[in-house]
Image (spheres, rainbow, N blue to C red):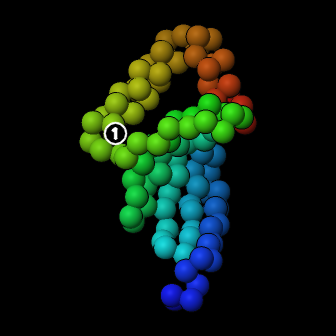
């Protein structure tokens, strides 16, 4: 496919809220998350992207074990705080993913 080197293809299919399957010329990957924080796991790439929605600014870091543990710890802490005091976390969740919360 050397003659199609500059041609790009990308299709994103929503499976559930916050879960998408990405199809491209080079392979298949899965994205978890939404505006502001996304984890992408594919055949060639594993990364976490954190951004400020609406600004175009984001930071992408490869998904290594320390990063994965930090993401899991953050999710656990936010989940526990949400269970104990939902009114404290709900505005943050609403700003991050307004369609879900």
Position above or below: 65 against 71: below
Tell whether 82 sits left or right of 44.
Answer: right
Q: Quadrant of the C terminus?
A: top right
Q: Which residue: 52% across, 47% down? A: 32
Residue 69's image quarter? Answer: top left
* Mark 1 secondary-structure assignment: helix
Q: Which residue: 60% across, 45% down? A: 18
Which residue is more in the foreground, 66 or 30?
A: 66
Q: Position of residue 79 (x, y in %)?
A: 47, 24
Q: Position of residue 84 (x, y in %)?
A: 49, 12
Q: Residues within 10 Å of mark 1 (few under 14, many from 20)?
A: some
Q: Position of residue 72 (x, y in %)?
A: 37, 33
Residue 24's image quarter? Answer: bottom right
Q: Which residue: 41% across, 26% down? A: 74
Residue 14's image quarter? Answer: bottom right
Query: Is residue 100 among what the camera can see?
Result: no
Furthest-left residue in this view: 65
Q: Position of residue 49 (x, y in %)?
A: 50, 41
Residue bearing mark 1: 68
Query: Is residue 35 among what the camera can see?
Result: yes
Tell whether 2 sits left or right of 100.
Answer: left
Position above or below: 45 against 96: below
Which residue is more in the foreground, 27 or 54?
A: 54
Position above or below: 38 against 4: above
Q: State how many labels appear.
A: 1
């Amino acid at each position: 496919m050397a003659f199609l080197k500059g041609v790009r293809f990308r299709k994103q299919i929503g499976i559930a809220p916050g879960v998408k399957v990405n199809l491209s010329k080079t392979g298949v990957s899965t994205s978890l998350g939404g505006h502001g924080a996304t984890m992408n796991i594919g055949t060639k790439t594993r990364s976490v992207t954190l951004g400020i929605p609406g600004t175009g600014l984001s930071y992408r870091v490869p998904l290594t074990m320390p990063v994965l543990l930090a993401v899991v710890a953050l999710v656990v802490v936010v989940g526990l705080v949400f269970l104990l005091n939902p009114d404290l976390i709900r505005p943050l969740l609403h700003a991050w993913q307004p369609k879900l919360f």
